[in-house]
Structures are given as C-alpha cells and as structure tokens.
Amino acid sequence: MSPRPKKPRRCGCRFRGKAFKPTGVPLSETEQVILSRDELEALKLCDADDLTQEQAGRRMGVSRGTVQRILSAARKKVARALSRGNAIVFE
C-alpha cells in the first residue's frame, strides 16, 4: 500500500539553491543541513511574521497540525546547524 500523495503547498520563499554558512569556511568543508521550502516558509510565517500556526496553515494551504510538524522539524534543524557551525542549505 503506497502512502497518500503529498498535498500541494503554497510557499513564497525564494531562497532556493542558496546557503547560510559560517564565515571564512568554504561550503564544501562544512556539514550541510538541508532546509526545505516548506520548513523555511513555516519558520518565516510563524516566527518572523508572528502568525499563529492556524493562520500559517491557511496561507500555506495545509492544516495547523501539518504546520506544527513542519515547524518542529525546521526549528530542530536550524538549532543543530547553528550550535554545531553547520551550513544551512535552502532546497
């Protein structure tokens, strides 16, 4: 039995292919953490734009629970990358 198809999501972020990395260290020499467009959009909407998860879900076209799961994964990735000096690559 195959999983249900992924629901299309609306994302306004335009950082595809770019990276945030420690200064003075080449990207090829740092461990890379991949942050998906969904994760970046959820972080932006909830943390930078101060929307609730429900409002962010409406903007992205998904449920509040989905936003919560995406946001949790994104925050964990960003915290690990910042604390370990890894590069964050935007998918």
Image: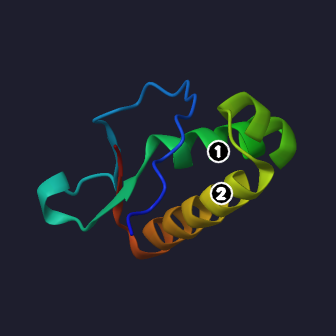
The residue located at (41%, 75%) in the rendering is 84
Q: Position of residue 15 (x, y in %)?
A: 40, 30
Quarter that holds the N terminus: bottom left
Closest to the observer, 46 or 18: 46
- Residue 88 percent coordinates (x, y): 38, 54
Residue for badge 1: 42
How many numbered marks have been drawn onto this rendered protein structure?
Answer: 2
Q: CA distance from mark 1 to mark 2?
A: 6 Å
Q: Amino acid at mark 1?
A: Ala
The secondary element bearing badge 2 is classed as helix
> Which residue is found at the position 31% from the left and 36% from the top?
18
Quarter in which the C terminus is drawn = top left
Reading the image, the residue beneath label 2 is 71
**84 or 78, nearer to the observer:** 78
Left or right: 40 as drawn, with respect to 36: right
Three-letter amino acid code of the residue under disc 2:
Leu
- Tag 1 secondary structure: helix
User: x%, y% of residue 7?
Assistant: 54, 41
Q: Measuring from the top left, give residue 35's x and y in whole percent.
A: 42, 52
Cβ–Cβ under 8 Å for marks 1 and 2: yes
> Which of the labelled discs sits on residue 3, or is there none?
none
What residue do we see at 55% from left, 68% from top? Answer: 79
Q: Is residue 85 left or right of residue 75?
A: left
